Amino acid sequence: MSFLLTDDLVQFEQVLRRWCDEHASIEWLRTKVPLPDAAVEPLAVTLSAEERTRLWSGLAELGVFAAGLPESAGGLELGIAATRLIVEICAYQLLPLPVFETLALGAARISSLEASARTTELLEQVGNGTLSLSGALEANAGRLEVRTTKKGTTLSGTLELVPSAREVDALVVQGSNGVSYLVGRGAFHEQPTSTLDLVRPFYRVTFDKAVAEPLGAANEGSVSNLSQYLL
């Protein structure tokens, strides 16, 4: 696993930093989020849906979400070094968007699974910016009870400290059987949780027989959770 910056990554870094300065500068964020309010609520909730869509679409056009994905899913295949670089820049800029969550807790986990038409489809959606994801931190993995019937699969249980659960399209979580599942927004209940992070919102997420889509188990030796390297 290499974090070395190639010439392509150095150029990508310059383009992304320039875009952030032009479209989502810290000065602009200050006008959107008065400092007294920042101590009460996460920054993300102060942006309008239109502003969030504009910023997310802009990042997708730059290739931010496709940079670390495999070519088979329409990605640029620049590896974990690109993901680390993107997360670092977006965090430095205080971008109130689930970039880290989508790349490290969502796409990375899907990439670690045995490849299928469905996993490739999901990664393509991440890459073009039409799917945002999050998931539980490593300490929460495997706490969900799995039940499979003729009608499908459901998950039950609670996960603590799930970042941006309310702001993303779906969660990628792991059941007690070691299989990863996709759970769409609306199938679970999220309750805001206070943390020291004033930019990224965290939630306590409860699954009560939540309908879930099985995605498969991780390949042996794969890196399913990049948060340990990127947080």
Image (cartoon, rainbow, N blue to C red):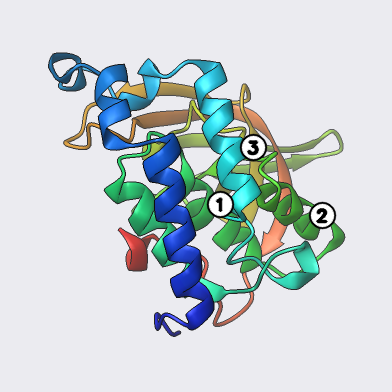
Question: What numbered label is drawn on residue 13?
Answer: none
Quadrant showing the C terminus: bottom left
* Residue 68 lies in quadrant: bottom right
Q: Position of residue 136 (x, y in %)?
A: 44, 47
What amino acid type is highlighted by mark number 3? Val
Mark 3–mark 1 contact, CB under 8 Å?
Answer: no
What amino acid type is highlighted by mark number 2? Arg
* Residue 77 lies in quadrant: bottom right
Q: Nearer the viewer, residue 72 or 172?
A: 72
Estimate how packed mark 1 is, as few (under 14), some (14 to 19) or many (20 or more) residues with alpha carbons within 10 Å.
many
Between discs 2 and 3, the one toward the N terminus: 2
Relative to 167, say whether 171 is above or below.
below
* Residue 21 lies in quadrant: top left
Relative to 195, say whether 112 is above or below.
below
The secondary structure type at the circle numbered 2 is helix
Q: Residue at x 68, y 53 (%)?
A: 127
Q: Residue at x 54, y 82 (%)?
A: 221
Q: Nearer the viewer, residue 62 or 167?
A: 62
The secondary structure type at the circle numbered 1 is helix
The secondary structure type at the circle numbered 3 is strand
Q: Which residue is mark 2?
A: 118
Estimate how packed mark 2 is, as few (under 14), some (14 to 19) or many (20 or more) residues with alpha carbons within 10 Å.
few
Q: Residue at x 37, y 30 (%)?
A: 204
Q: Nearer the viewer, residue 118 or 207?
A: 118
Q: Nearer the viewer, residue 157 or 182?
A: 182
How far, Cα to Cα, is label 2 from label 1? 14 Å
Q: Position of residue 191 (x, y in %)?
A: 38, 21
Q: Which residue is mark 1?
A: 106
Question: What numbered label is drawn on residue 183?
Answer: 3
Q: Nearer the viewer, mark 2 or mark 3?
A: 2
Q: Position of residue 92 (x, y in %)?
A: 28, 50
